[in-house]
Image: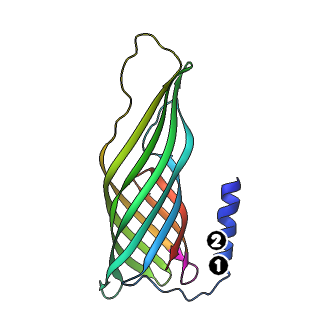
Amino acid sequence: MKIRNLMMAILLFGSLSAINAQPIEKGDKVLNLGIGLGSTLYTGSYYKNTMPPVSVSLEVVVKDDLFDDKGAIGIGGYAGFAGTKYDYMGWGYKYSNIIIGPRGYLHYNFLDKLDTYTGLLIGYNIVKATEFGTATGWSYDASSSRPIWAWFAGGRYFFNDNFAGMVELGYGIAYLNVGVALKF
């Protein structure tokens, strides 16, 4: 409930600012801050989130003037974190996942203040697993760090030249990320 109220206040503040937002251009830097809904990492009846998925990404627009001045290309970095607990009758694992890596973006702006994009993350999922409780006959390592890739598609609605609401769908730290974007 508190997160929803905070998001509404941020969106209201942004909408009261200047209205003439421009699409992204070469040289722009955009910082995305998001919270995830729907974990892509662990599912099942014994799994519970201990920390909702959160993410931060920074993009630099390196090419614009594509697709009749409506498209652009960007590159940047991504970091996401989530915590999960597997608990089966008092025994289980606490997991922490950190996903890091570079991302590439392809933008197409359908409307003046709406920046839509798709892209690909190629990175690494760093997994830490800590066992708790006691169980007999169980002996295995639950850590599974590995290289990953993730496709994503998103949109940013700019309330002014520097502030936007952000939504991303994909297969990174969460299926759906919502948050804010700051352009500088």
Q: Quadrant for residue 2, please give it.
A: bottom right
- Vertically, is 105 above or below 184? above
- Whole-percent x, y for residue 156 in the image: 49, 72
In the image, what residue type sits under mark 1?
Ser
- Vertically, is 49 above or below 28? above
- Vertically, is 184 above or below 11? below
Q: Disc 2 and disc 1: Cα gap in Å? A: 6 Å
| Label number found at residue 148 | none
**Disc 1 element:** helix
Task: State left or right for residue 4 relative to residue 157.
Answer: right
Scheme of colours in the image: rainbow
- Of 124 and 48, nearer the camera is 124
For label 1, the residue is 15
- Whole-percent x, y for residue 63 in the image: 30, 81
Task: State left or right for residue 34 relative to residue 103.
Answer: right
For label 2, the residue is 11
Q: Quadrant for residue 151, please give it.
A: bottom left
- Whole-percent x, y for residue 7 in the image: 64, 63
Q: Are marks 2 and 1 in contact (CB under 8 Å)?
A: yes
Q: Which residues are magenta?
A: 157-163
- Whole-percent x, y for residue 56 in the image: 48, 61
Judge whether residue 161 is colored magenta. yes
Q: Quadrant for residue 61, please give it.
A: bottom left
How many marks are shown on the rendered structure?
Answer: 2
Judge whether residue 5 is colored magenta. no
Q: Residues within 10 Å of mark 2 (few under 14, many from 20)?
A: some
- Of 164 and 131, nearer the camera is 131
